[in-house]
C-alpha cells in the first residue's frame, strides 16, 4: 500500500480489503494466462488510430516567450505550450514516473521529478527574470467528487504553492487549470480567499471554461482555466480560445432521453468548424452504427484505490457499453489488449489508446505500471486544448 501524499486509500475492513485483493489476483492470473496465449481466441485485430493529435496542434515558430511548468504530470500543458512556440524553461512534478515520461519524450528539457520536483521545497525567486509564463494544473483531488472535495483541508491542495511561485517569480502571465467544481458554490470562499485575494494586487485574472471536444479531442471533458496577467490592459484585450471543432453526431442513451446535441452543433458554424471524431473513429475501430465522444478518462491516481480502469461513472459505463469498448483493466499495449479478451468480447482499451483519447500523439509514451501511466494521462490537460490556450496567451502578450 503506497504512502505517497497524492494517494488516499479507503477506510475499509480487513475482510473487505481481502475481497478486493482476491478479485485483483484473479484478474491478474487471467491476464497472465491470456498473454501466454492460453486465453480466449482474440476477437479484434490490433487497431491503427485514425486520429493524429499532432494535426490538432501544428508546430508554431518560437515566439520568444519562456514558460515554466508546475505539476507537469504527463506533460499536457508542457506539450501544448511547446508546440505553440514557447521556450521550455523547466518542469516540476512529484511523481518520479512523470519525470521519466517527460525526459523520454523531450530529452532536451530540464525536468525535476520525485523529491526534486516537490514544489513546496523550491525557492522560486531564482527564476525571477527568467520566466514569462507559469503554467500548471495543481492536483484536482481537493475539489473533485472523486477526491472527496475537502478543499484546503486536503493535504494535496497545492494551489497555495502555485500562487507562491507566481508571486515570487512575478511572470508576465500565468495559467492554472483544474476541474470545474472549483468554480462551483461549494468553493466560493476558497476561490476568493486562497486564489483571488493573494493575486489581486499584482494580477488581473480571467476564468475560462473549455471543452476538450471543441478542440478535436474525442472526449467529454470540461476544465476551468485561470488566466492571469500582470498588466490589466493585456487582461482586457485577452481573447479566450474559440472552438476549432464540433461534435455533431446524434445520439440517445439507454434511458431513452431525448436526442442531445453539442451546443455548437446548434449554431450555423459548419463552414468554420471541423468535425470532432468519436471514440471508435479516432481509434480506428470498425463502424458499428454508433459512435460517441469518450466519457471523461478517469485518473487512476484520483480515487481511493489503484486501478487500471478509466471508468468514471455509471452513465459512462452505459456509453462504453454502447460503444462496445471495455474500459476496465486497461492493457499496457495494444498487443496485450488484443490477447486479453473481455467476457463480453468488447474491444479492450490499451494505454496508447487512452493517450490518443486524451490528445497525446503516439510517440508520447508514459512510464510506469499501467495505473501510473493512466494516472498521468487522466490528470493531464489534453495537449490540443493546452495548445489553444497557449496560442491565446501568446497573442495577448504580443
Image (cartoon, rainbow, N blue to C red):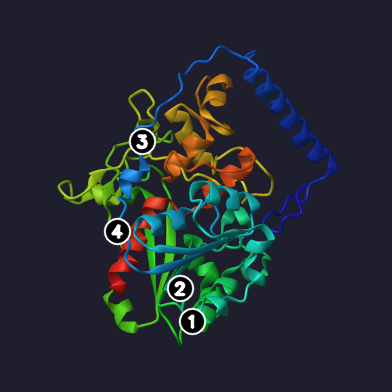
Mark 2, other Cα within 10 Å: few <14 / some 14–19 / many ≥20:
many
User: Nearer the N terminus, badge 3 or badge 2?
Assistant: 2
**Above/below status of 230 relative to 305:** below
Q: CA distance from mark 3 to mark 4?
A: 43 Å
Mark before the other along the chain sequence, 1 or 2: 2
Q: Is residue 28 left or right of residue 199?
A: right
Q: Position of residue 120 (x, y in %)?
A: 65, 70
Can residue 192 be seen in the rendering of this structure? Answer: no
Residue 191 lies, with reference to residue 364, above or below; the image says below
First in sequence: mark 4 vs mark 2: 4
**What residue is disc 4 on?**
61
Q: Which mark is residue 252?
A: 3
Q: Is residue 57 above or below residue 232?
A: above
Q: Which mark is residue 131?
A: 2
Callout 4 secondary element: loop
Asked which quadrant contains residue 236, the reply is bottom left
Q: CA distance from mark 3 to mark 2?
A: 48 Å
Look at discs 3 and 2 and give the one toward the viewer.
2
Residue nearest the observer in this picture, 244 or 303: 244
Callout 1: helix, strand or loop? helix
Q: Residue at x 31, y 73 (%)?
A: 397
Q: Secondary structure at mark 2?
A: loop
Q: Which residue is mark 1?
A: 199
> CA–CA distance between discs 1 and 4?
31 Å
Q: Which of pointers 3 and 4 lies earlier in the amino acid sequence? A: 4
Amino acid at each position: 500500500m503506497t504512502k505517497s501524499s497524492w494517494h488516499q486509500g479507503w477506510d475499509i475492513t480487513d475482510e473487505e480489503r481481502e475481497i478486493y485483493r482476491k478479485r485483483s489476483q484473479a484478474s491478474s492470473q487471467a491476464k497472465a494466462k491470456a498473454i501466454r496465449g492460453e486465453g480466449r481466441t482474440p476477437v479484434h485485430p490490433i487497431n491503427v488510430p485514425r486520429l493524429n493529435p499532432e494535426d490538432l496542434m501544428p508546430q508554431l515558430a518560437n515566439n520568444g516567450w519562456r514558460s515554466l511548468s508546475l505539476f507537469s504530470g504527463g506533460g499536457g500543458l508542457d506539450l501544448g505550450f511547446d508546440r505553440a512556440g514557447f521556450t521550455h524553461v523547466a518542469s516540476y512534478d512529484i511523481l518520479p514516473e512523470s519525470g521519466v515520461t517527460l525526459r523520454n519524450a523531450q530529452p532536451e528539457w530540464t525536468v525535476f521529478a520525485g523529491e526534486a520536483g516537490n514544489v513546496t521545497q523550491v525557492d522560486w525567486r531564482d527564476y525571477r527574470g527568467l520566466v514569462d509564463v507559469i503554467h500548471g494544473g495543481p492536483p484536482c483531488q481537493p475539489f473533485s467528487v472523486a477526491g472527496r472535495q475537502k478543499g484546503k483541508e486536503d493535504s494535496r491542495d497545492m494551489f497555495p504553492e502555485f500562487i507562491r511561485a507566481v508571486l515570487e517569480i512575478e511572470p508576465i502571465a500565468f495559467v492554472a487549470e483544474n476541474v470545474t467544481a472549483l468554480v462551483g458554490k461549494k468553493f466560493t470562499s476558497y476561490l476568493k480567499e486562497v486564489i483571488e485575494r493573494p493575486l489581486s494586487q499584482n494580477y488581473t485574472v480571467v476564468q475560462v471554461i473549455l471543452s476538450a471536444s471543441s478542440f478535436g479531442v474525442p472526449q467529454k471533458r470540461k476544465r476551468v482555466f485561470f488566466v492571469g496577467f500582470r498588466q490589466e490592459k493585456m487582461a482586457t484585450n485577452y481573447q479566450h480560445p474559440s472552438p476549432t471543432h464540433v461534435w455533431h453526431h446524434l445520439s440517445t442513451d439507454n434511458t431513452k432521453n431525448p436526442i442531445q446535441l453539442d451546443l455548437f452543433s446548434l449554431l450555423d458554424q459548419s463552414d468554420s468548424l471541423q468535425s470532432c471524431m468519436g471514440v471508435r473513429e479516432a481509434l480506428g475501430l470498425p463502424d458499428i452504427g454508433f459512435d460517441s465522444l469518450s466519457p471523461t478518462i478517469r485518473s487512476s491516481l484520483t480515487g481511493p484505490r489503484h486501478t487500471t480502469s478509466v471508468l468514471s461513472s455509471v452513465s459512462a459505463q452505459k456509453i462504453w457499453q454502447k460503444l462496445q469498448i471495455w474500459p476496465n483493466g486497461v492493457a499496457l499495449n495494444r498487443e496485450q489488449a488484443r490477447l486479453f479478451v473481455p467476457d463480453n468480447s468488447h474491444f479492450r482499451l490499451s494505454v496508447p489508446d487512452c493517450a490518443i483519447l486524451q490528445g497525446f500523439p503516439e510517440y508520447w509514451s508514459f512510464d510506469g505500471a499501467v495505473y501510473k501511466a493512466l494516472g498521468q494521462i487522466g490528470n493531464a490537460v489534453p495537449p490540443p486544448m493546452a495548445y489553444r490556450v497557449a496560442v491565446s496567451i501568446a497573442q495577448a502578450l504580443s
